[in-house]
Amino acid sequence: MLLIHKKLTSIAGFAIFLLVVYVTTYALQTTDAQDAKGSSSYTSINETRDLYSSETRHSRRLRQAEVLDDDDGETEDRSGGEDEAKTCSPGLVLPLWMPQKHLSMGDRAMRGLVYFLLMIYLFVGVSIISDRFMGAIEAITSIERTVTIKAPDGTKQSMRVRVWNETVANLTLMALGSSAPEILLSVIEIYAKNFESGDLGPGTIVGSAAYNLFIIIALCMVLIPTGEKRRIKHLRVFIVTAVVSIFAYIWLWMILSIISPGIIEVWESLVTLIMFPVTVLWAYIAERRLLLYKYINKKFVVNKRGVVVAGEHEADETDPEHGKPSASSSSRDVNAYEDARREYIVLLAELRQKYPDADLEQLEMMAQEQMISRGTKSRAFYRIQATRKLVGSGNLMRKIQERAHSDLNEVKAQLHRIEDDDDEDEPTRIYFEPGHYTVMENCGEFEVRVVRRGDISGYSKVAFETQDGTASAGSDYVGKNGTLTFPPGVDEQRFKIEIIDDDIFEEDECFYIRLFNPSDYVSIAVPQIATVMILDDDHAGIFAFAEGKCEISESVGVYEVVVMRYSGARGSVIVPYWTEDLTAMDGRHYEGVHGELSFTNNVTEQRISIKIIEESSYEKDVAFKVHIGTPQLAPDSATYQNYTGDHTHDELLEQIQELEKKPYNNLTELERVMLLSKPRNGELTSVEVRIRESSEFKATVDKLVAKANTSAVLGTSSWREQFRDALTVIPADESELDTDDGDEEEVPRCIDYISHFICLFWKVLFAFVPPTDICGGYVTFVVSIFVIGVCTAVIGDAATYFGCALNVKDSVTAICFVALGTSIPDTFASIIASKQDDSADNSIGNVTGSNAVNVFLGIGLAWSLASIYHMAHGTTFNVEPGTIGFAVALFCGEAMIAISIMMYRRSAKSIRAELGGPVASKWIHASVLFSLWVLYLTVSTMEAYDVIDI
C-alpha cells in the first residue's frame, strides 16, 4: 500500500504541475496577444511565437520577421481572424488528430490530456526497451580476455579480465544507453523538420541536464540512510566530466549567441561532435593517471620500510607498499581478483558460523549469492533493476539467486567432468593396481589385480610371470606365469599366487610379478611390476609408520594413519600412540588423539583415526605429528583382557620373559635369535601430517569468483526466457537477499499485477528483440536502438501535438515534460545505487558524464548532419538562440553553483562526502539544489513567453 500511495502521489503531483503550467502559459499568451494587438494568428503556433520573440530581441532579422508577419496577416485573413483556426503541423510518425479548426477550450484540454497520457505510456515503453538496450551494452562491455600474470612468489597465474575499461565504458556505451532517447529525439527532430532547427530536441537535452544535476543529486543526497555517507571514488574522472559538462553548455551558448549568432557553421557542429571522443580520452588519461597526471597532486608519505616517498592524494588509489599507484592495469586486475577471493572466503566463514548445520554446497551457493549482490555493479544494473520494479517484472535479486545456483551446479559439474573424462580418447593401458602387496607367510594364497584403462572397446592381452627377489619360488611361494585376456568392456582381470608357510624364523622376503608382451595397440603403464612382501609369522614384528610425511586435504573428514607390522606377526602386541601440535592446533585444525593399538596374532596393520576439522580455507598449510611408543607384548593379565575383550595364553611371551631373566652371555645362539624376535620399533616412529586446503574447494572458489559478476543477470539467453519473463508477474520486493527467509515464497501484490498488465503490451512486444547471448549482445544492441528511435519519434510527435493543443511552446514542453519523462528511470536507478553502493560513482558520478555526452552526441550529431546538408545545398543552417540560448546560459551559472556545493561537501570536515552525512546539512544543500531547478524552470518559461526580455 505504501508503494501504491507513492505512485499515486507522484502521478497526482505531476498532473497538478501540468495544470499549473497550462494555466500559466495561457495567461502569458493572453498578455502577449494584447501587447501584439492581434498579431498572434498563425499557421503554426510555435513557429510564429518564436519569430515574434526573434523580432523583439534580434533587430538584425527585422526584415525577415516582417515578411513572415505579412504571411501571417494573409493567414489571418483566410482564417477569418478567429483563434479557433490555429492548426498543428503533421508529425513524422503519429497522424494528426483531426479536425484542427474551431476547437473549444474543452476540446483542447481533452486532447492535451490524451497526448499527455500517451507520452507517459510511451515513456514506459522506452524505459523497458532501454533496459534491453542496457543489457546488451552490459554484455558487450563485460567481454573478458585471459591474461597471465606473475605473482609475488614468481608463480604464473591465468585469470580473466574485462576488455573494456570502466571509465571508457561509462562514458561511451553506458552514457549512450541512459541518454539514447534524448540523443535520438534531437536527431529525429532535425530529420522530421527537413534539416531545420527545432526546440524540442535541444530543449529536452538541456532540461534533462538540469533535472539530472539538480533533482537526482538532491534526492540521492537526502535518501541515504541516516548516519551513512557516500563519496565519489573516481574523483579525477568526476572532475574531468564536471568541467567538460559545464564547458559543453558554455560552448553551446557561444556558438548560438557569440561566434556566429543564429547560424551553426559546419566546423562548429563538427567540433561539438569531436569533443565526445576527446572527453572520453581525457577521462581515460585521468583515470589511468597517464601523461601529466602522474606528476601532479602529489604528497609525501612514509611507506612500510620507513622511507619517505611521493604518494598520491587519494589514499584508496595508492599502493600500500610503495605509496604510489600501480603501474600496470594487470596488477590492478590481480588485486581486484584477490580481494574478491578473500571476500568470498570471509563470507563463507561467516555463513558457516551462522548456519553450522548446512553442508558445504549450500554454504557455497549462499556465498555466491552474496558475492554477486555485494559485488561492483554497473549503471546498467541499477537502471534495469529500477525499471523492473516499476513495471512489475520483479527484483533482480531473485535472478541473482537463480544465477548463483546455476553457477555452482555448473562449476561442480565441470570439476567432476574433468575427473571423469581423464581417460577419454586415450590409448589402451594395462598395469597393476595396486603395485605393492604385503602378505603373511601363512596366508595360503592372495589375489593380484590387473586393470585396463583408456579404450576398452576391443580385445586386449598381456602376459605375466613371477620373478624371484629375496624370496625363492618353490620354497617361499609357488611361481606362476600365463596370459590375461580382456574381452570388450572388461576393465580388470585377477589371478592368485600361493605362499608357502614354514616354522623357521627368517627375515621378511619379497618377489616380483612382471607384465610383458601386450597385444597390438596396447601399452603397459606404470606400475608394470608388482612387488610382493612376505612377512614372517614366527616373529613378534617391527612396528613403524608406512611413511614419514603425508599431505592431506582439509576436506578429508577423518584421516587414518597406517601403522605397519613387518618382520613377523606372531603374538599380541600393544603399541601406544599420541599426537603433537606443530603449526596445526588441536581443537582448531584437528582433534588430537592418544591411546594404544592392539595387534593380535597375525595382524599386520592397524590405523589411527584422526578427525580433520574443515575450515574451508583457500590457502592453508598447517602440520601436526603422530607418534608411536615402544611396543610391548600383551601381558597375561586381567588389564589386557579387559582392554582387548579376549584372553589368550601366549607361549612366545613366556619364552621371552624366561630368556630375559638369564645373563646375555649365557644365552645360546638360538636363544639370542628368539630374544631378538620380541617386538620393537622401526625407523619411522613418527609421521608429520600436513593439512592443505581442499583442491576442489580452491578450484570452486576460483571459478565462482570469476563468475561473480552481474552481467549475465542483466542479459537473456533465449526468446523462451524473454517471453516467460514478459508474461510472469514477479513480486518487486524491496529487500536485499535474505538467506533467512529463503524458504518463504513471495506473493505478488496488487500493485505488481496492476503494473504488469499496464506494461504487458510493451513486455510482449519487446520480447521479440533478440537475446543478448546472440553474437555477444551486438544484435540486441542494433535492434534495441532502432526500436528506441521509433518510439522516440512517436514521443516527439506526441509532445509537439501536446504543446500545440495546449498552446505550449516546444521549448517549454521539452524542458518541463519530455526531459522529466526521459529522466525518471535514471532517477530511480540513482536512488537505488546510492543506497546499495558503497560509493557515489553510480548514483551521481555518471550525471556529469551523461550531461556532456548529451551535448556532444545529441546536439553535435544532429547539428552536424543539418549543417552539412545545408552546406551541400548552398544554404545556411539557422538556429534561433531564443529560449534555448537563454536556458543554456542559465543552466551554466546554476551548474557551477551545484558543482561548488558538491566540492564543499567533500572537503568539509563535518561531512566529507557528496551524499548523506549530517541530517541538517544534507537537507539544506538538497533544498538549494531543488530551488535551482525550480528557478531554472520558472525563468526559462517566463523568458520563452517574453515575460523576461533579455
Image: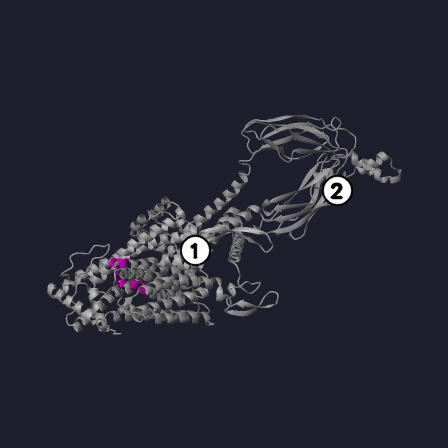
Q: Which residue is mark 2?
A: 682
Q: On the image, which quarter does residue 123 sit in?
A: bottom left
Residue type, label 2: Gly
Q: Residue at x 45, y 58 (%)?
A: 166
**Image position of 236 (left or right of 269):** right
Mark 1: give few (<14), some (14-19) or many (20+) Cα within 10 Å: some
Q: Report the coloring of the rendering.
A: one colour
Say which quadrant the N terminus sits in.
Answer: bottom left
Q: Main secondary structure of the magenta part?
A: helix
* Residue count near mark 2 (Cα–Cα under 10 Å), binned few <14, some 14–19, many ≥20: some
687 or 95: nearer the viewer: 95
Q: Regarding mark 1 in the picture, which secondary structure is present there? A: loop
Q: Which mark is residue 235?
A: none
In the image, taking residue 814 as reference, residue 476 lies left or right, namely right
Instruction: Look at the image and say whether residue 193 sits in the magenta stretch.
Output: yes
Answer yes or no: is residue 746 visible. Answer: no
Name the amino acid type tagged 1: Glu
Going from the N terminus, do you reach mark 1 or mark 2 first? 2
Side (left or right) of 142 relative to 422: left
Q: Determine whether 38 is above or below 639 in the image.
A: below
Can you give x and y, in whole percent of width and height, for residue 270 in the image?
Answer: 34, 62
Q: Is residue 264 visible?
A: yes
Residue pointed to by mark 1 = 736
Which quadrant would the C terminus be assigned to in this image? bottom left
In the image, which residues are magenta?
A: 188-207
Q: How many marks?
A: 2
Left or right of 447 in this view: 169 = left
